[in-house]
Amino acid sequence: MNDGRDTWRRFMRARADMLTDCGDWRRGMAESLRALSEWEADGRVHGHPGHWALLRRTARGLLARLDALPEQPTPAQRLELFEAGYRFTRIGQRLFP
Amino acid sequence: MTLCFFDPTEGTLSSGLTRQLETLDGWLREHQLAFMERRWREGILLYEKVYELRRYHLDFMESELLPRFEDRYPKPPHGARPGYFLREKKLIIKTMRPYAYLFGRLYLREAMAELSLPRLFDEYMYLKDLLDHHDAREKGFLFRLLDEALSRETVGTLLLNYARGVEQREARWL
């Protein structure tokens, strides 16, 4: 069963790589955020429906910020996006323990 | 080099000390950017300066500003009780101190690569919230109300003393 943990781990890895501009973090973030923004948890996955809705909404917001970045974001822009993702990581860690 | 970012001969506590704190916030960000680019030595130095100057600022608040505030406002407005400022001072120092030691230890062992930047920067989110919260309390109550209650001469003397204290600390980074 795909319970979203792989997607979540992919997002966390890409977010970490973004800090040091390592590898194709942009693609990793975009694909994982897109998947998480549409994630539908089935009955076997724990978590309150409101938390899942918040996760999807926050993922969409982050995706929009990621799309708005220039092709070669500055370190300051990468740091800003990293920090903008902090709240998202708190939500995700509750849903993907 | 000067680590005092306002002109102590003019202005108010609100304008001078707010400018000082905002510059330190900018340096904390510069420290993060330096670490992202593995400019470890520069990043550590920036953190040390922010830590020392924050400590200095908090000591000054406790020894110079709060006693005058308590004297002028024996019944402070809600949210401006001196105990709140002191509690936050302890929390800020307790949160910042371990990093200063950690960075120094790792650098001496040539082991900065062991540092997990994502974890560190996520931890900083708490620190930044704490600093924002405390600074807002200082700007909203302490600086503003002292500017209103104290004479221009007293405010000028306080700013001058603050700047002299900063000067004394500059020597360690020369």
Image: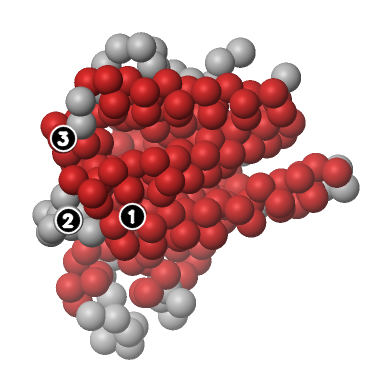
Left or right of B67 on screen, residue B161: right
Estimate how packed mark 3 is, as few (under 14), some (14 to 19) or many (20 or more) residues with alpha carbons within 10 Å: some
Q: Amino acid at mark 3?
A: Ala
What label sits on residue B74 in the rendered view?
2
Q: Amino acid at mark 1?
A: Phe
Residue at figure coordinates x 37%, y 28% from the top left: B158
| Marks 1 & 2, CB-CB < 8 Å contact | no
The residue at which mark 1 appears reads as B85
- Of B64 and B125, nearer the camera is B64
Estimate how packed mark 1 is, as few (under 14), some (14 to 19) or many (20 or more) residues with alpha carbons within 10 Å: many
Q: CA distance from mark 3 to mark 1?
A: 19 Å
Q: CA distance from mark 1 to mark 2?
A: 15 Å
Residue at figure coordinates x 52%, y 39% from the top left: B56
Badge 3 and badge 2 both on one subunit: yes
Residue A14 coordinates in the image, percent (x, y): 52, 48
The residue at which mark 3 appears reads as B149
